[in-house]
Amino acid sequence: MPRASISTYMLRSVRRGVSSSAKVSQAAAAAVRRPAVAQQVHSSISHPPLQSSSEPPSPPSPSSPKSSNRPMSFPCLDVLEHRTRSFDTGPEPTYSRNVSGYETYHSSQPLRLDNGGILLEYDIAYETWGTLNADKSNAILLHTGLSASSHAHSTAKSPNPGWWEKFIGPGCAIDTDNFFVICTNVIGGCYGSSGPSSIDPADGDKYATRFPIVTIDDMTRAQQRLISEELGISKLHASVGASMGGMQSLSYGTQFPDLVGRIVSISGCARSHPYSIAMRHTQRQVLMADPNWRRGYYYDGVPPHAGMKLAREIATITYRSGPEWEQRFGRKRADPRKPPALCPDFLIETYLDHQGEKFCLEYDPNSLLYVSKAMDLFDMSLSVRQKAIKTRALTNFEDDVATATCALPHEPYEEVEENADTPHQLNFDEARDDLVAGMRALVDTPVFVLGVESDILFPSWQQKEIADVLREGGNEKVEHLELGSEVSWYGHDTFLLSIDEVGQPVKKFLEKGL
């Protein structure tokens, strides 16, 4: 879509709304501001009796003379209630057992964060494939999506297939005969890297929601220490990623333009837009409304598995496309011999239910909150980066106190009118110019951008925006490819499923000039 038409559409579509959020209790706010108090709050709120373990109220008797119809059964709710009761003896969440199959880089140097928080030290889990050449010039850093681990491909230590198994290996899109591939779990995650489920070194307790807000740029600065300090690589051959990984790839190149040779961004964006922010907000609200979330202090009790299941179902709707589901499910019901039910009944419902069931114990709920918020905050604009640099420089801490100056909300945020006391918020054209300026750091870097027409989470015009902004900034080495619906109707998940359509152009770009 041309720039002018996007601008006109967006300006016509914007409507003023009143923002709202749930009130934050003083105890929870204090828990984030003061670790000593947080430990007391943790002690008082992380071990309450299991509220959901009691039996549900009994429905009226089927023979009741006051009832004209039989009461309905709800087996889907029975499953959730049974799982909640079972946490007295199990099941243990899968992510909590993820303790092998990867290497761990530990940084003992503090990492100042874009929004004023700090990590006094941190771990990054990573895996590698291929062989690093003598001058260490053939390394590719592969970035993950929101909930992925460092296990992009099988290894001797961890032989199970990885999330990009068919894209990595000899002769594949990322050819391990040519390249040394590194993949990490991001900070904020739960698969070996420091996140909310990790131990706070200041007091030996889990961070929970005392973990600071992180950004995509924070994630890539943490990765850069691994690349330079642990692996001794002075310059990457390429930074590659899809979805949130596409954001990270651009972030890495913009923060360290002299330390990476080329950039691949698949199904990503240069700044998060309202639709994707809204979808992730909805997922977080569903999760936080689960009474077992307990403001993040659930690690010694029942995790918010019901909220996680529903959040994943919402997310799954955005990962695929309507046309695919029309062909795959149509209006078919799971068992047309039975009457309709309020529990999953149509095939599309049973599919979403299955996806939620698989995920609800595989990923830490707090990590979902933090990492998805980092995606919302992503913005490559120059003013955003300058503000972050200033904030990091002003972050104060003492070596013996794990407390940084970090503004936290005491009351719900409300929409304010712009005045002399509030920062100026850019209009559409000003924001576009700001974005061009922010990405000008990549002016000399070859960049390959791939989008998918059927993607509703990161629509293809957002990948075109990346290419257009780079070109407006003077980059003459930008390649942009859009896969039409006739090529792939898998939506956002195309980068996981269309091996040839995605893999071959990526391979060609990475190997150009070799």
Image (cartoon, rainbow, N blue to C red):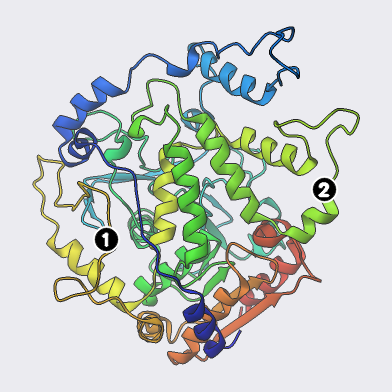
Say above or below: 293 vs 300. Answer: below
Is 113 on the left-hand or right-hand side of 439?
Answer: left
Q: Nearer the viewer, residue 483 or 305?
A: 305
Q: Quadrant of the C terminus?
A: bottom right
Callout 2 amino acid = Phe
Residue type, mark 1 in image? Asp
Measured in 3D between alpha carbons, the distance from the residue under mark 1 to the one under mark 2, in whole angstroms, is: 44 Å
- For the residue pair 162 and 112, the one nearer the viewer reads as 112
Measured along the vertical axis of the image, is residue 356 above or below residue 168? Answer: above
Instruction: Estimate how packed mark 2 is, as few (under 14), some (14 to 19) or many (20 or more) residues with alpha carbons within 10 Å.
Output: some
Let me know if residue 145 appears in the view. yes
Q: Does label 1 or label 2 sit earlier along the sequence?
A: 1
Q: Determine which of the numbered discs, if any, sits on residue 45 in the image.
A: none
Residue 32: x percent and y percent? 22, 40
Please tell me how crowded label 1 is: few (under 14), some (14-19), or many (20+) other residues with Cα within 10 Å.
many
Q: Identify the image quadrant of the N terminus.
A: bottom right
Q: Secondary structure at mark 1?
A: loop
As helix, strand or loop, the secondary structure at mark 2 comes to: loop
The dot on residue 114 is: 1
Q: Residue at x 79, y 70 (%)?
A: 487
Q: Position of residue 338 (x, y in %)?
A: 86, 27
Residue at screen point 26% across, 60% down: 114
Q: Judge left or right: residue 450 versus residue 118.
A: right
Q: Which residue shows up at 56% across the image and 45% down it? A: 151
Residue that label 2 marks: 329
What percent of the width, then of the height, locates residue 34? 15, 37
Location of residue 87 in the rendering, given as x and y in whole percent from the top left corner = 50, 16
Residue at left offset 47%, top offset 82%: 445
